[in-house]
Amino acid sequence: MKVIVIGAGVLGVSVARHLALAGEEVLLLDQGDAGTGTTATTFAWVNSYRRLAPDYHRLGLAGMEEHARVAEQLRGVPSYFPSGALQWADSSSEQWLASNVERLQSVGYAARWVTSEEATRIAGDVRIPATITSIAHFPHEGYVLPDLFVSNLWADAEQHGAKSAIDKVVAIDDRPGGVSVTLAGGEVCTGDRVVLAAGRWTERLAAQVGIDVPMVTDFGRGSQTVGLLGYAKSPELDLHCVIHSPGLNLRPAAGGHTVLQALDLNAEVDPVDPPSADGDIAKTITQRFTALLADPSRAPEIDLRIGFRSLPVDGHTVAGYASPRSRVYCLVSHSGVTLAPILGRLVAAEIATDQEQDLLRAFRPTRFIGVRRSDIEAPQRATALGEQ
């Protein structure tokens, strides 16, 4: 079977790898290099913290477990770190944190309260402000270095025969004899199946073959799809885990660098007029980061980057065919980094064997048939401690 995978983000590359491992002929298409779209600007926290629907929580847990298995299989520089995560609350957020810890503990999710002294040992080279009133530790969470992760996945896929091409997809055709994909350069690629893993472009491409995958498509100033990340090159920190604090989230990056996220500032971000290095947003992030440094005299050097989240309108992953006759498999998720290993394996299994995978039953695109968009739209703006 020849499978054309559209989209070389973390989901598309993971599916391509598993299909190649299964012996299928795989062609991966994207308008850019692997992992340079949405995947390149993600906080990359591996968790199942705020998946309130039971089916989604189970999928998140499976994603966390699958990361450890995939890490053992991949060659190259390690890209997955089961570091655990800390959440620090102050008086304005301590009740929110307490309710989340209680909810997670009730479903068996590893969560425990720690003292400031223990949290300092877990966190590494940061300072916990005196305003922090409670701290929770989530020992089974972690993070990935997304560029390395995608690179390692794709290297393994290529090792097993997967091919790729860089060009923009302009048309998809699904007919009884097979599928075809037309590229901007004029080439027409044919195959037996298409995996549509095109992130925020999914709705437009799916519509070409009569499939409705409603996505949040507003990418303007303050949209819930827009996310700002800071990349602190200095000072170099020995940060040991993911940290969520009031006003700023931190995640270790390579070479002692730190990825920063201030969720409340996203509402002020305009992709058409990105925040400047000396503007108010940059100054606010710098001030918040400095307040967490053990040595606040070291002036941070921070690059700002805007990312765009891939958001199905109801907030849940989409995985499956839109009808029994369809040869186009739709795959899109806001939680691409956490779910990529498990979705890659399960989606490839469904395509290669035509056997339904239990964990994916709740996420079919058929759930949108005959449903008004306004009836399923879910608020997805992340602002509170531990949201994403």
Image: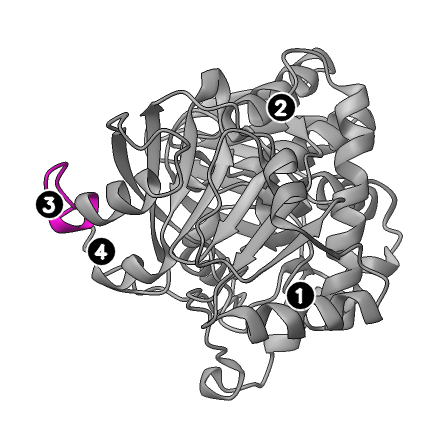
- 357 horizontally vs 124: left or right: right
Would you place residue 264 above or below residue 290 in this image?
A: below
Is residue 1 on the magenta stretch?
A: no
Which of the two marks, 4 or 3, is nearer to us in this view? 3
Label drawn at residue 51? 1
Task: Say which amino acid is labelled 4.
Answer: Val
- Going from N to C along the chain, the mark reached first, 1 or 2, is 1
Asked whether the beta carbons under mark 4 and mark 2 sit within 8 Å of each other, the answer is: no
Q: Which residues are magenta?
A: 272-282
Q: Which mark is residue 347?
A: none
The alpha-carbon separation of the residues under discs 1 and 2 comes to: 24 Å
Query: N-terminal of the two: label 3 or label 1?
Result: 1
Left or right: 307 in relation to 352: left
Q: Tell me residue 246's x, y (percent).
A: 43, 58
Mark 4 or mark 2: whose residue is earlier in sequence: 2
Q: Which residue is mark 2?
A: 79
Query: In the picture provided, is 347 more to the left or to the right than 191?
Result: right
Label whose residue precedes the other's in the sequence (2 or 3): 2
Three-letter residue code for mark 3: Gly
